[in-house]
Amino acid sequence: MNLARVLAAAGVALACAAQSPAPEPAPVTPASARLTGEQMLARAKRVFRAHVRPPFVEYTLVRRDRHNGLPDFDNSYVLKIWCRNADRSALTRRAWNGVAYGSLQNVTVAFDGYVDPGPPTADIFERALFTPRTPEPGPPQPPESPLPLIGAVTVNTDYDYRVTGVHREGALWHLSLAPKRDPDRNRLDDLWVDATTFELVRMRVRDHLYLEFTSQSFEDEFDARFAMLDGIPVLQSIHGRTRDDEFETDYTYKDVVFPPALPAWYFEPKTYGLHRDEAPR
């Protein structure tokens, strides 16, 4: 091959190389997208519980019911609630135009109970959060931990739920859950968490609708939304709907504050008669 042919071939190769587009860089996969569903659930729990719960929470709970699309005034009301987070014992009074009135009542605020759900600072991953209607002693449960230690190895295992699906929805991860043990106790069905911080944004949970003036209860699905308040994720609202869509209930948590202390008698119902003049309003 003579020199002219070599130079011509080299020129053609250079021209072709100049016309070929540069290869695009490989997309960078976010670290969270490489996590398994179990790891995502463990991280969501860890982030949620990293926020220290205040000892007390005071709030107004607005409940609005509808029956077959029409307002149900018999089961709608407004409560002012003063709650001790350690045991969810609460002093409650009816409220009107922001002022509490009427008798003093002591309740234990909990999901899936005859009283209204809450408190807004509830640890939604806590087993005892959900109160079975007919509690019975069961077999011993393993200690609850999203990250059990085996020797010196940390394992992402959840004792209560398995993750059945993970979907990206905009800026959120949607985790679908199924109970591993007791579906009457482990009632979380879905979680939505921030894809970057893993802060809890929304949950769907199976509950019951208990009517105010009857002993009736219905299977109810709660769609709950959270918001950050003073660095703590708190319940902001819940929309409940029965399976047949006959009943709908909206709970709105308003005027949430974290008092540093509350009088001890708030949580001693046997002394309420002695404190009528001191009743909070």
Image (cartoon, rainbow, N blue to C red):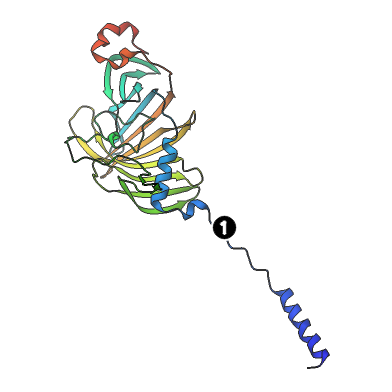
Q: Position of residue 235 (x, y in %)?
A: 40, 33
The number of numbered badges drawn on the structure is: 1
Residue sitting at 76 percent across and 86 percent down?
9
For label 1, the SS is loop
Can you identify the residue that label 1 sits on?
28
Residue sitting at 41 percent across and 28 percent down?
53
Residue sitting at 63 percent across and 65 percent down?
24
Q: Position of residue 151 (x, y in %)?
A: 36, 47
- The answer to whether 132 is drawn above or below residue 4 in the figure is above
Residue sitting at 46 percent across and 43 percent down?
198
- The residue lying toward the viewer, choosing from 42 and 267, is 42
Q: If the image is split into quadrants, where does the C terminus sit?
A: top left
Give the amino acid type for the residue marked by disc 1 in the picture. Answer: Val
Q: Residue furthest front?
A: 151
Q: Position of residue 184 (x, y in %)?
A: 23, 41
- The answer to whether 210 is drawn above or below residue 43 in the figure is above
Residue 96: image quadrant is top left
Are there few (<14), some (14-19), or many (20+) residues within 10 Å of tag 1? Answer: few
Q: Position of residue 139 (x, y in %)?
A: 19, 41
Residue 215: image quadrant is top left
Q: If the image is split into quadrants, where does the N terminus sit?
A: bottom right
- The residue lying toward the viewer, choosing from 172 and 88, is 88
